[in-house]
Amino acid sequence: GPPLLENSHRTGRGSSAMFSASALCALCRRVASSPESRRLLQMATTAAVTAVTSEIDIWSFNLRTELVKEDDLENSWPKRRDEVAALIGKYNPAIVCVQEATVAMLSHLSSKSNGTYQWKGISRQPSKPDECAGFLFDVEQVELLNHSVFWLSPPG
């Protein structure tokens, strides 16, 4: 299919770059798990990026869903959310692939970015509020060209 993101940050350091956000996010989820995964991500990124002379940062971030009833209230989402938003704001990655996010979590992070970050994601159970694997993207660094979702198994 067509690439999902195009590098729209033109600094004269390079030409446009094309990314498949869903492919990168799927690989990002496994990056920390093994050296082989890191090598696969590097190969996929190299294959997906055309004519790039500048670099962008792509993160994988397990946000730890707010839907879980926890005994560990000190680390609950309401106590972490502003720090997570500040961390993203400080380092300004182009794309943040997320796991265990909810619409409310992604909306909060986007709202704290002063319009710099937008997000895409869909619940595992589209008719109910649930966690999702989605992504945030910095509109000053990348442009969303297309977005779609397909399931490998029935939703839910």
Image (cartoon, grey):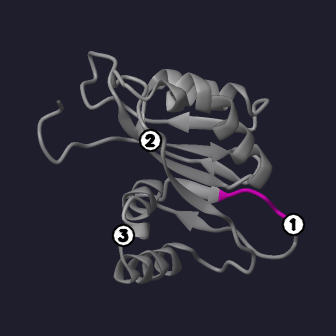
Closer to the chain start, of discs 1 and 3, is: 1
State the mark number for residue 134: 2
Asked if disc 1 and disc 3 are in contact, CB closer than 8 Å, the reply is no
State the mark number for residue 145: none
Label 1 amino acid? Thr
Please, which residue is most extreme toward the left here? Answer: 154
- Which span is picked out in magenta? 7-11
Asked if disc 3 and disc 2 are in contact, CB closer than 8 Å, the reply is no
In the picture, which quadrant includes the C terminus? top left
Q: Main secondary structure of the magenta part?
A: loop
The percent position of residue 89, horizontal first and vertical second, equals: 76, 44
Residue that mark 1 sits on: 11
The percent position of residue 88, horizontal first and vertical second, equals: 69, 46
Label 2 amino acid? Gly
* Residue 139 occupies quadrant: top right
Q: CA distance from mark 1 to mark 2?
A: 28 Å
Label 1, residues with CA under 10 Å away: few <14, some 14-19, many ≥20: few
Element under label 2?
strand
Q: CA distance from mark 3 to mark 2?
A: 19 Å
Label 3, residues with CA under 10 Å away: few <14, some 14-19, many ≥20: few
Reply above or below: 148 against 51: above
Residue that mark 3 sits on: 33
Asked if disc 1 and disc 2 are in contact, CB closer than 8 Å, the reply is no
Closer to the chain start, of discs 3 and 2, is: 3
The percent position of residue 106, horizontal first and vertical second, equals: 54, 30
As drawn, is 156 to the left or to the right of 83?
left
